[in-house]
Image (cartoon, helix red, strand yellow):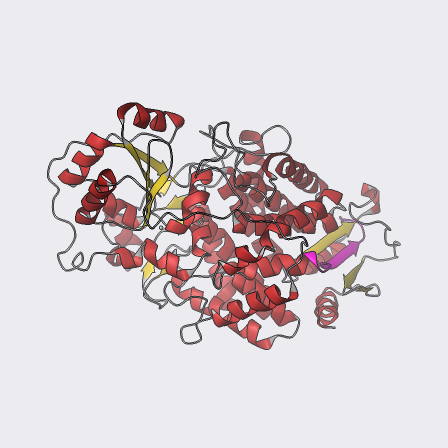
Amino acid sequence: MPNHRAAYGVYLMLAASLFAGACASCKTPDLERRGGPPAPEKVEAIAWIDWSDEAFARARRENRLVLLDLGAVWCHWCHVMDRETYADPGVAALLRARYVAVRVDQDARPDISRRYEEYGWPATIIFGPDGAELVKRRGFLPPREMRALLQAVLDDPTPGPSVTTERPVLPAESPFLSDALRTELRRRYVDGYDREQQGWGTIQKFLDWDCVEYGLERGREGDAEAERMARATVDAQLALVDPVWGGVYQYSHGGVWTNPHFEKIMQMQAENLRIFSLAHSRWGDPRHLAAARTIAGYLDHFLTSPDGAFYVSQDADVVQGEHAAGYFALEDRGRRALGLPRVDTHVYARENGWAIAGLAAFCKATGDAPALAAATRAAKWVLAHRALAGGGFRHDEQDAAGPYLGDTLAMARAFVELYEATADRPWLARAREALGFLDANFKSTAGFVAARVPPGAEGKPWAPRPQVEENVALARLAIRLAHLAGEPLGRALAEHAMRYLAAPEVGESRGYGVAGILLADRELGGDPIELTVVGPKGDDRAKALFAAAIRFPSGYTCVRWQDDREGPLPGLDTPYAAKDRPVAYVCARGACSTPIDDPTKLLLVAEEMVRR
């Protein structure tokens, strides 16, 4: 199986039927009955190589096909494939004799991951020597099925039914959804909700953060049913919080919330942290606050490097390939006696951006100073070790390809969240630089592509192309920066991304997973909630007003702190007149409040103005 997300987290947001095919339903019926796989025969190892042009050059020279095993280091069923399928003598012999065997860690190669994420992890793709796709399969393939597949493609190396011609997306003329398409996407959003078990989708259960956030925003405007669905989903997600170490499990299978798969992936941690923080600010439920605290604690104890940057994930299995339900049922001492599931200690800019944004959201909701310190420390580390000229970021210390859209996008969002949490203007400047890098490197005729297209990749099946979640995130970031910083490039980029998202074939292909498109559409079409504090930053009364302003539970805010000693405030055409005391103003729906000097009243006025 995304990621999430890292690309597997992204994958989680696709249709639930695709998600099911990746892991839960791919288990062989007798695997649990026989207590695990038999001891493998001694088999000559498969000589896996990295994804590269040379892999296809070799295939052409030696008249071989290319098999891509696309997986994740944290993925249980990827481990089972290794233990059972790739250890099978027949499978190994066919691969050694007739194939070039390529293995890719999807977290390390966002370009390849984004291209094939709907196939889940593990994904198996077979190519001809010329790079043409012949077969695409999702999920675990047992040995007998894999042997049959490998031989069948050798016997008939023409594209099978899993390979379909993809029509290019024609951008919509307008950056806004048509009324008919908006209505249809809202219908899918509502109809995709599981009213019996809660949450969106009926096969795998996980917190779809866009769906919850859209419900929260609709609820604030008076849609009680949307708010009820969002809150019930957040409540249900509590079942996937690890009660011992904190953090959230990836998902639960079987259509219920009580059968978790145990991998812990950064995007899931970061977005759950953000949503639980928003939920606590909105509804004041102490359970949501406790869940957010456990996630922040998990990041600190398990996924933080000695330098303060963040790691990628923690494995689902303590013994790779063996289901870990019994292990995770233990308390801390019992788990540690058996060992710790492996942590992927790569440090990627994208995953750090996600973590920083999640921690900043937690700080905004709670005032938690250690969380803000951790977010700031990680941001400074990424700036020192992953920055590229022009405001962008590479993925790892050394990248095989790239740069990738996701790294700069995630860090730009992180900078915006840090700016709102601190009112420190250098973070806003960093976000604006990153926006320029996104424009210069990833803009295509239809939206923004997942990676800069390398020489020779044009026209190849795996050539980078637009991806929905990234275009949603870019549109939302860009329009927010347009308001927050008065950044003219922001609206242009948001509109460009939305013309891709507004193409009917994009929304119509996504089942219920359309909330992100709806969020981007509503934000492009309306102004954010603006909360501006006016007063010296050293004044305790001004600090209290700012703490209240950043606590307002919305993903579409514009929070500023006007301290006249710092000069003109970015994004504010006309500064507010200074008063004899610190005050704050709320602007929403084309109107602004009178000066407010009471932090509690500030939030009440903001809620009232949004509902008008």
Q: Residue furthest top?
A: 61
Left or right? Give the position of 197 relative to 594.
left
Viewer-proximal residue, 186 or 537?
Answer: 186
Left or right? Give the position of 104 relative to 80.
right
Q: Is residue 253 magenta?
A: no
Answer yes or no: is residue 416 visible: yes
Q: What's the magenta region?
A: 524-538
Query: Residue at horizontal 71%, vertical 54%?
Result: 558
User: Quick check: 479 above or below 589?
Assistant: above
Query: Could you say where residue 387 lies in the image, as x and y percent from the top left?
Result: 57, 31
Q: Is residue 532 magenta?
A: yes
Query: Residue at horizontal 14%, vertical 39%?
Result: 90
Question: Which quarter shows the C terminus?
Answer: bottom right
Query: Could you say where residue 61 lies in the image, as x and y percent from the top left?
Result: 30, 23
Query: Residue at horizontal 59%, vertical 54%?
Result: 503
Answer yes or no: is residue 303 visible: no
Query: Could you say where residue 115 lies in the image, as x and y percent from the top left?
Result: 44, 43
Query: Could you say where residue 146 lies in the image, as x and y percent from the top left?
Result: 22, 45
